[in-house]
Image (cartoon, helix red, strand yellow):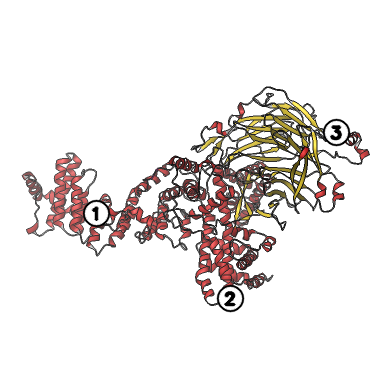
Amino acid sequence: AKPLSNVCLYQICRVTEFYCPFKCLKGGSPNVQRGKMAGVLERSYIEICGFERESVLRFRQITLNLGNAVLYADSAGGFSYEDSGKLLSVTSNRFIHWSTSGDTVQFVEQSLDTNLLNNAVRLRIPNCLLLPGGVCIQETLNNIIILIVTSQSVHRLVLPHPTRMYRSDLVTELQMQSIFTDIGKLNLNEPAHSYVLPFAQGTQTTAPSTSAAWISHEGEALFALASPSGAITVVTLPAHDQDGTVSILELKQSSMMQRLAGWMPTAIRGDQSIPDLAISLAVHQLEDDTFIFALCQDHKLRMWSLKHQMCLLVTDMLEYMPAGRGEVKASPALAHKLRLFFSSSIGLCLAIYLAVPKRSQFCVLQLVASENNRYSLDHISTLFTTQETLVDFVLTATDIWAVWLDNDNQTVVKYISFEHNTTGMWNQVFVQPSPEEEVHVGEDQDPREIYLDVLFSPLRFTASAIIKALQIYKRDTERYSDLSWEELKKRVTVTVENELQGSVTEYEFCQEDYRLLQVEFWSKFYACCLQYQDVLSTPLALHISPATAMVCVLKKGFVSFLLPCFAIDHLYLSSDDYLISEEETPIAEDSEMSRDVLQLVQCLRMVNESLPEDMAYEMEKALEDLLSPEKVSEKVLEGLLASDNGNVIQDITNKLQDINNPIVAINMLLRELDLETDAETDSRHTGNNWQLLFMRISLSQLYGSSVAASLICQAVCQIAMTRTLICRDLLILQQLYLRIGDNVRGSQLLQLQQDLISRCSNLLCTYHLLKQMSLTLSSSVPLDILNADLQHLSVLELSDSTTPTSRRSVLNPQTVVELFYQNVARKAIMSQIFSQQDVEGNQTMLHWSQMISSVLTLLCQFLYPLDEYVRLVGPWCQVNVGSYRFVLGHCYLASGEGQKALQCFQEAAAEVDKEEFLMKLTGSVEEAATTTAPRLLYYNKVLRLLEDIGLPELVIHLATLAISEAANDERIQVIALFVFAPCIITFSYTSLLCCFVLCVLQVVSIIESRARAVDLMTHNYYELLYAFHINRHNYRKAGTVMFEYGMRLGREVRTLRGLQKQVNCYLAALSCLRLVHPDYAWIVQPSSGAAVIKCLKQLLSSDVASYKMRQKIYW
């Protein structure tokens, strides 16, 4: 996709802010409708990577110098504010995520509503490595407290709560300070913030294996560390605002057998491990006690009471295994994991992952209390999985979410309901695929351009991966953290081209050899980017916001978000195993139709799998070149039939025969794919005006940050890409139906030919358009061009609304969709969602799945063509044709293509009195303007625009066309004269004046009055009148005009130049009178002046004057 004109992007956003000309708005806003695109299946999610096109995130470095080191695996985690799900809250949609690697932990605070400043910090504690579970964040009324556990120390960071940084929940700033803004002012070496463990020796055999941390009800910071001896050491720091001493206690088994086992050498016991060594810890606080749960190497779960310092419960987890317990018991547990979930409704639940080769399982248990402080565990569910390497999992009130790495080191994310799942089938999450291992470069394509397009596409690589690859490729350690996206692109280009030039030893190359060299060097750099992108994409943890149910996958280099998958996308993306298990779908209304729809989707998948890469590229190219999708799909089908060596088409044909009612099934799919919707206005909210104002201001910030913009617009791109494939495959499948037609006959066949295929073709063009808009990057708009564009808009009288406040994103650069979302669509979307919900007070909850689904649906409905993409719409969109032709013409003007703009303006003229946008543009909707022809008002606006830009040739052309339309109607000509007169007179368009054959007197009267009213040295309308009369052979009138002109020059311009012009005027007047019959060769003198007559007689008798008169007779 080609880069768009800078001006056009801003310009269209400005135009659409005043009024959107396209049907998707219809003068209002689209509604989210169930059963349409918003019908989300609660069965699958899609992963959207949240990395932005910016330079590497700038972390402020903080270093603490302490002891030695051991090795632990990298880890990550997240924290969501308690009020992050409330609309009227300073912490709405706000969260913190962290990652650890060796002796370093880095924190990033993010918000989906506003951009946070100074939001990243990296803390390094040399030789003190972060323990698993060694980071905990909790909030109090006034503070955010971060607890950190390393192999040799514990730390507490006390930061201000956002509600204390911003006293009001009403936040209107485009940017806010993060809680990490003043972290550099903390002295982390003070005893209140750090404590060195006295028992830590820094060796692998003495270092803790895992940890947990929490804040007590009294404000104390507690740290539980799993000792290599099997005990659990609890370190307690006094509250940060109170004096006190650090206390350490140890929880350990006190039975005689435990003491004997602990004393007996491991060689005598026959194992090399400590049975009760905790490998996973979790903590739950009660009102007067704290329970510490430890999952140990002997596969047993132990529950400790911190108050009583004793073990209250021991459960052998192998009892929940159906088979193979003896084999598992013989080896120590190393990868088991433990998670807790508590709510007032269901109590405390535990989920234990038992890592057993090929028989891994999750056990969900509920803690039950009885009298006398006796506790037991009730079994709720056991869930099995075939995945091997579990990275992390999270327990919620109803589900288990888990992330794995498969045998190919690819990320796998799934979730399952542990109570209501009868089939044991895990729900799918369609993860973001890795970039292609190879880039296909066509013979007619430039390898450099193709590789740059792929590398800097919005969906493939992070800036960090490209920078790392650049450092390796150049074999240097130069830092590129301050490079913008465009600067980085230039640096990559220069680096690869220099490497290529440095390897050339010959002075002459044929074009093909040089092209192969380009492919070789660019593919080498691309391979480096792939390697680092894979590393940065390694998953470390899952985070689920308890308040909004937002699910994030925390990776080494970025955070990805899981969005609900729409029904049609779910069916198309699901694997065959899942499709077979589907019994019903919300797309269909009954089980019979559900079966037909599922069969149809399976056929679509078979078409997709059978389509060769060259045919897929042919379809893509046809859409870009504005060719007919129907004809290209016919050609592709013929190619498939000709190359059907594996009888795939025959298999598809056989499957099609099993669909009872294919026309209805196809119609249902098209209905789900259709973005059009009717607008409805809703004025239900008639409550307190202050409350509504408060609500609307909060809505103005909702999902307004650069993180949210990137996330939402990448989701639109994913939807568009998926649905482009669906429409393409469905179009090919319908062409196949036309060929076989076994179960499609009569009226159904006619419906398929005349309705369904054309609808599918239009939808294919629609989604291709959205995809292009989502992938095309823009660049910044120079200020002078921006000001000129605003001036042009003011000529169209579209500047009467308030000037928008640009929410300039840190995205660098933005895509077309991101620009449209942030500058135009977002506020309209939020207002529409607000109008459809009953919002009361500050208790409005922002449920992630519902909100993001509504936003995506409305954005897709709002999104219609900008600039280059209006061109793509032309061949197939028949709604408000004149409006988008006018918008495209305006864009052509901004990009300097005047002739194309003129053609678009002419095409739009035919729709002026039919389309609301054009009627509003011309002002013909107002009662006072009804007496003037709308097309003349439209032409007048366009002429003024062309005049303002300075294109006189286009003004002449368009005005001639406008006047010619009124050639036979005197009334229309008079109106046209008054409308166009200012423009005609300004540029002295004599030829246009001659077109007013039915109203000559009015033409002359207007120009004469204008000539007598203006300064002679600035505007010369006398010469225009003279030329007009000469053109009409009215020489006497022409002479009169020049005589009057000369008289005024003599009175008003008493300079040498004025005298020269006066002589020429009188000579011209005499020349005109010589061409008139002697009986009429006279002029009525405008004012008395015998001296003037005498001067004329002297000039007539002069030989010199006669010579000059002959020389200037046509002056």
Residue 412 placed where, x, y %? Answer: 70, 51
Name of the residue lying farthest toward the front = 371
Name of the residue lying farthest toward the top = 243
Instruction: Tell which circle, 3 or 1, labels the residue nearer the N-terminal end.
Output: 3
Write down the residue under mark 2.
Answer: 741
Find residue 95 and report its image quarter.
top right
How many neighbours does mark 2 have within 10 angstroms: few (below 14), some (14-19), or many (20 or more)? some
Q: Which element type, helix, strand or loop, lies under badge 2?
A: loop
Q: Is residue 802 magenta?
A: yes
Residue 898 vertical position relative to residue 228 in the rendered view, above or below: below
- For the residue marked with disc 1, what is the amino acid? Phe
Q: Nearer the viewer, residue 822 or 237?
A: 237
CA separation in Å, label 2 and label 3: 81 Å
Residue 192 placed where, x, y %? Answer: 68, 25
Residue 922 placed where, x, y %? Answer: 33, 54
Q: Does residue 315 appear to the left or right of 79 in the view shown?
A: right
Look at the image and give the residue range highlighted in magenta.
799-803
